[in-house]
């Protein structure tokens, strides 16, 4: 029995545990961005439902969380939006939907900068600090993955709401009625690897381009240290 435990690959579990706080940061701020944007456009539904909260439990979806922690792509509990409050419902839905991914890209930029800034201090100074250092990187990466995943035009992802704002009104509302079936399709596409391959490639490519922000932080840290 001891030999079996010794040969188990614990890297998947430890990586998932390392992802817990980053995932909670990503989904919480993502959903708050939706709710706050909707409120600014005249829809108080999310506020009235208590979803303009930094409490992760308010936005927690167990299946989406597990997918995010283990696969790298997932979702949160959707913020309720009532487009009837918007002056232009289609435009309002598109702007509200886009707010989530935009927020995640901003999170990526902030955490990449912090990752570079903290590199001289945290990279080799004990397990606790090393964990925090790795968490900065993980948050930046997962937030970008969350943003790119959500811009896919598959309902109920944010990209579908942005795309639908460019199609005729009748077709828009008809497609919105089938939104709940999109989640089943998403799970199948991610679990089977059909979608995860292109997604990983896209995330790697964009993350590599954005990593210049970490270099800025590193250079600033070296200037401060000197």
Image (cartoon, grey):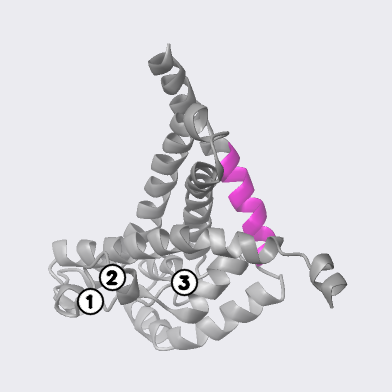
Q: 167 or 195, which lies in front?
A: 195
Residue 75 is marked as: 3
In percent of width and height, residue 152 lies at 52, 65
**Label 1 with label 2: CB-CB less than 8 Å:** yes
The first of marks 1 and 2 along the sequence is 1
Principal SS element in the magenta part? helix
Residue 173 belongs to magenta span: no
Q: Which residue is drawn at 44% across and 77% down?
A: 156
The first of marks 3 and 1 along the sequence is 3
Quadrant location of the C terminus in the rendered image: top left
Q: 99 or 67, which lies in front?
A: 67
Q: Mark 1 points at which residue?
A: 83
> Is residue 218 shown above or below 210?
above
At label 1, counting other C-alpha atoms closer than 10 Å, the crowd grade (few under 14, some 14-19, many 20 or more) is some
Residue 199 belongs to magenta span: yes
Farthest top residue? 226
Quadrant location of the N terminus in the rendered image: bottom right
Separation of residues labelled 3 and 1 (CA atoms): 21 Å
Residue 139 appears left or right of 191: left
At label 3, counting other C-alpha atoms closer than 10 Å, the crowd grade (few under 14, some 14-19, many 20 or more) is many
Quarter location, residue 124: top right
Residue 9 appears left or right of 204: right
Q: Residue at x 48, y 46 (%)?
A: 132
Q: What element carries label 2?
A: helix
Quarter location, residue 220: top left
- Of badges 3 and 2, nearer the viewer stands 3
> Is residue 169 shown above or below 132?
below
Q: Name the residue under label 2.
A: 90
Residue range in magenta is: 196-208
Separation of residues labelled 3 and 2 (CA atoms): 22 Å
> Is residue 15 shown above or below 57?
above
């Amino acid at each position: 029995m001891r030999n079996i435990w010794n040969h188990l690959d614990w890297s998947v579990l430890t990586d998932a545990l390392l992802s817990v706080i980053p995932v909670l940061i990503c989904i919480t701020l993502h959903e708050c961005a939706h709710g706050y944007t909707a409120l600014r456009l005249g829809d108080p539904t999310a506020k009235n439902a208590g979803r303009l909260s930094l409490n992760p439990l308010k936005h927690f979806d167990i299946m989406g969380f597990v997918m995010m922690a283990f696969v790298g792509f997932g979702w949160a509990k959707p913020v309720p939006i009532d487009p009837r409050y918007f002056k232009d419902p289609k435009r309002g839905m598109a702007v509200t939907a886009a707010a989530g991914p935009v927020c995640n890209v901003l999170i990526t930029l902030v955490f990449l900068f912090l990752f570079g800034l903290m590199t001289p201090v945290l990279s080799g100074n004990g397990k606790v600090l090393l964990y925090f250092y790795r968490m900065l990187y993980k948050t930046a990466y997962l937030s970008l993955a969350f943003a790119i995943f959500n811009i896919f035009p598959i309902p109920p992802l944010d990209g579908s709401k942005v795309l639908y704002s460019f199609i005729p009104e009748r077709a828009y509302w008809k497609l919105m009625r089938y939104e709940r079936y999109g989640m089943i399709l998403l799970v199948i596409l991610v679990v089977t690897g059909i979608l995860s391959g292109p997604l990983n490639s896209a995330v790697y490519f964009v993350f590599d381009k954005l990593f210049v922000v970490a270099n800025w932080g590193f250079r600033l840290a070296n200037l401060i240290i000197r």
